[in-house]
Image: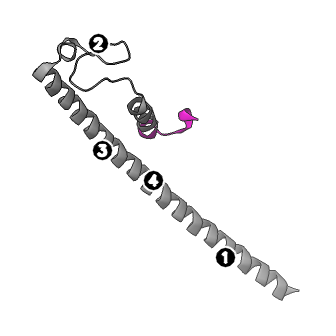
């Protein structure tokens, strides 16, 4: 299913799965629960580890906001496309109704 999604929507879904995983320990307190170190500064903990964790969280929040904006734009484009398609189909229906009326009057 993911291959049918636009790249920005697919990235958003992957990002949400990443964020929902419970792999982190307490932010800035050293290595996480998942076995990965997270880098030497985060492993060391302390003030630098907390700062690094805060910067990382801000980065991911910004990325999430960008992805949400892209998803919203995608939905607006989809809605606009469907409205135009509905209008086109309605014109097509009206055109065929006119032909049917003409055929009935010709009989």
Q: Could you tell which of marks 2 and 4 lies nearer the N-terminus?
A: 2
| Front of the two marks 2 and 4 | 2
Q: Position of residue 47 (x, y in %)?
A: 11, 23
As drawn, the residue found furthest toward the left would be: 47
The correct choice, above or below, for 74 with respect to 53 in the image is below
The residue that mark 2 highlights is 37
Query: What residue lies at 84% left-to-right and 84% top-to-bottom?
Result: 104
| Front of the two marks 4 and 1 | 4
Query: What residue lies at 49% left-to-right and 54% top-to-bottom?
Result: 78
How far apart marks 2 and 1 lie (CA) works out to: 66 Å
| Front of the two marks 3 and 1 | 3
Graded by Cα atoms within 10 Å as few (under 14), some (14 to 19) or many (20 or more), the crowding at tag 2 reads some
Q: Is residue 103 magenta?
A: no
As drawn, the residue found furthest toward the bottom would be: 105
> Which of the 4 quarters of the picture holds residue 55?
top left
Q: Is residue 66 left or right of residue 18?
A: left
Graded by Cα atoms within 10 Å as few (under 14), some (14 to 19) or many (20 or more), the crowding at tag 4 reads few
Q: Position of residue 76 (x, y in %)?
A: 43, 57
Q: Position of residue 107 (x, y in %)?
A: 88, 86
Report the front residue among 86 and 66. Answer: 66
Q: Could you tell which of marks 2 and 1 lies nearer the N-terminus?
A: 2
| Front of the two marks 4 and 3 | 3
Secondary structure of the residue carrying numbered label 1? helix
The residue that mark 1 highlights is 94
Circle number at residue 75: 4
| Front of the two marks 2 and 3 | 2
Graded by Cα atoms within 10 Å as few (under 14), some (14 to 19) or many (20 or more), the crowding at tag 3 reads few
Secondary structure of the residue carrying numbered label 4? helix
The residue that mark 3 highlights is 65
> Which of the 4 quarters of the picture holds residue 64?
top left
Tag 4 and tag 1, C-beta contact below 8 Å? no
């Amino acid at each position: 299913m993911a291959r049918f999604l636009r790249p920005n929507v697919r990235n958003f879904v992957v990002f949400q799965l990443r964020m929902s995983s419970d792999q982190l320990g307490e932010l800035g307190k050293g290595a996480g629960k998942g076995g990965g170190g997270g880098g030497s500064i985060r492993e060391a903990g302390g003030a630098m580890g907390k700062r690094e964790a805060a910067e990382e969280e801000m980065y991911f929040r910004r990325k999430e906001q960008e992805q949400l904006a892209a998803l919203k734009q995608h939905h607006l484009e989809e809605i606009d496309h469907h409205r135009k398609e509905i209008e086109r189909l309605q014109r097509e229906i009206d055109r065929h109704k006119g032909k049917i009326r003409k055929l009935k009057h010709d009989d």
